[in-house]
Image (spheres, rainbow, N blue to C red):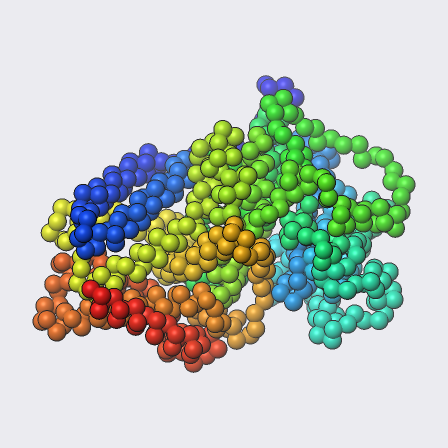
Amino acid sequence: MGREKYIPLFETKEARGRVFYRLFSVTVFLGICCIWAYRISNIPRKGEDGRWVWIGLLGAELWFGLYWVITQAVRWKPVFRCTFKDRLSQRYKKELPEVDIFVCTANFKIEPPIMVINTVLSVMAYDYSPEKLSVYLSDDGGSEFTFYALLEASKFAKHWIPYCKKFKVEPRSPAVYFASKSNLDNSHHSEQWVAIKKLYEEMEDRIETAITLGRIPEEERFKHKGFSQWDSYSSRLDHDTILQILIDGKDPNAKDIDGCALPTLVYLAREKRPQHPHHFKAGAMNALDALCFFMDEEKSHDIAFVQYPQHFENLTKNDMYSNSLRASFNVEFHGIDSFGGPLYIGTGCFHRRDALCGRKFTKDCKLEWKKDDDHKRLKSILELEEETKSLASCTYEQNTQWGKEMGLRYGCAVEDVITGLSIQCRGWKSVYFNPERKAFAGLAPTTLHQTLVQQKRWAEGDFQILFCKYSPLWHAHGKISLGLRLGYCLFCFWAPTSLLVLYYSIIPSLYLLNGISLFPQVSSPWFLPFAYVISTQYIYNLVEFLWCGGTILGWWSEQRMWLYKRTSSYFFGFVDTILKMLGFTDSTFVITAKFTDEDISKRYEKEIIEFGDSSPMFTILATLAMLNLFCFVGVVNKEIMSGNIFRVYRTMPLQTLLCSALVLINMPLYQGLFLRNDGGKLPGSLAFKSFVVALLACSSFTLLY
């Protein structure tokens, strides 16, 4: 196509008002420099009390300041993408490429099969040529219940897909669709809605009954040959390859109830043996909007993958666990996109197969999407299944580049992020697309423990990247832009930041209890830069959060979770990474549960924080909360006894503010320790332990000083 006729399939726009934001950022940076100058110029001399504490605060503030610079790098020039799907359809019509979609699951007890097949049915109903669409369910748990659910879904799809096309159904997940549609005005549509809903409920009931009884119906077991593959099944960690093509999209007889073709549907449980590492999710994995980025004649040749944000359909109004990641998906990823593309986050992503399989990008690299699909396949489904089973064996990857230079990379808890980084280091770029209509929906954790465990895995994996061969600090030098390297460091530095946050959460409060000032008084000129940086950053953070669609209460919950993640999840992620590097522990992969019991769900809907479990992370959080409460009560008591309660606000305003904020933000935790009677409270043993440890720490410090 000639350049004079070229019409882009997508365009990129820079955010407006960046000049004013950059000027604002410069003033904040000057304030940070003044804080550094205050710390350096007022370091106590050798032999004076508090010298090492002061140096510790200097180190913390240096780190916080430098980390703030990284956060500004991803806010410096954010870009936004928009696509032109109508141009794509007109230009390529029936020449669109084949698309493979992978749905992954690992444990039917944590990820219910009915939820998994809702995901499968939603992607099977994509508005895309079914002959060019293939859906693969990778079941790392090797569960016959998941296979049974998919078998049921393959039958229901023959009704669901034509229904979606006929009535332009949105969303296409049956469970979400039926939950959001209580009645329909059109009588004809209403009749079909009732009929399709009945089919879905009957399918759901059969699946749930099988799981409850712990066995597959004998009739189904004898009817479908696939169940025979579980005859040699020992455990989820010891079994043969199980592969079944449930719908063959190339088969002219694979039709829905309207006589239209169906997409290919495949079930796969790769072979697992105790003596062979299986590399968790990475080992298992080896839409028109996305195609606009891949198929633009002038701008698409270097794009390796298109990353979408993840949207959660079960968030409460104020998102009390801060699972929506508003700042990351609505601000930071747009900023990273301007430097060469966002991170690959493991879900909601379309990949160019060549880039994922290890191909290096060069300037003369122009890939053709057209493919000869007219050839006739002579092999039967049985022959294909037998041939391809070897590709999912334990030994297939031995002595190959899979997991090293091809496919998803192994050896890291966040195999997705490290895979995206390695692709970008080979010259490819990525694109971040955040459409108004959410493209991918998932389920967020509904308890505090689930959230913290998930965040620990992310922080631990991101920290591991710093020390691996793909580190953005040294491996990526000269291969990707400085801005993109800083974008990766934004997440890689989560874990080490925890040490400084813990320091800031403990030391100033203890010194406040003893009446020792660590910050300038209100009357000092040095108070101004502290006041300016603190106030402007919290105001900006609130404005940004509200702009991203949050609420004021949601912002307050975000501040609480910011503290909880850094003093528990990120800290344990840091410790575990160091222990792994020293050879004391092995890597594990923790799956986030996707369902909760009824009582937990009710508390979640009411936005009551769910503690419940006795976890080491809760022990740290409770102890820190009690320590700050003792310090706050102790200093208030001293001032009341002295008869000059306002003196502390003049002499130690910032320490008082910090301690007060830590007490206020921990109010739900105090309720969980002492006031609640429901199943979501903290255990009494943990309350006693945190009380004693915090009291001993405060008493010991007071005696020492």
| Residue 389 vertical placement versus 508 (above, below) | above
Spot the residue most to the front.
Answer: 47
Q: In the drawing, does residue 431 fall left or right of residue 494?
A: right
Residue 122 in view in this figure: no
Total of numbered circles in the picture? 0
* Front position in the image: 340 or 87: 340
At a point 32% along the width and 36% down the height, the residue shown is 22
Q: Nearer the viewer, residue 137 or 635?
A: 635
Residue 183 percent location from the top left of the image: 61, 65
Depth order, front residue of 378/524:
524
Q: Residue furthest bottom?
A: 677
Q: Could you say which quadrant of the image residue 665 lies in? A: bottom left
Q: Quadrant of residue 689?
A: bottom left
| Residue at the image point whose x is 34% and y is 42% from the top | 66
Q: Residue at x 74, y 53 (%)?
A: 270
Picture quarter with the C terminus: bottom left
Where is residue 424, by image quadrant? top right
Horizontal relation, residue 381 to residue 426: left or right? right
In the image: residue 43, left or right of residue 385: left
State which quarter of the image contains the N terminus. top right
- The relative height of residue 125 versus residue 84 in the rendered view (above or below) is below
Q: Position of residue 253 (x, y in %)?
A: 86, 50
Q: Position of residue 557 (x, y in %)?
A: 39, 61
Q: Work out whether residue 422 can be spotted.
A: yes
Residue visible at 39% across and 50% down in the picture: 497
* Image position, residue 620 (x, y; %): 40, 65
Using residue 701 as the reference point, say whether residue 158 is left or right of it: right
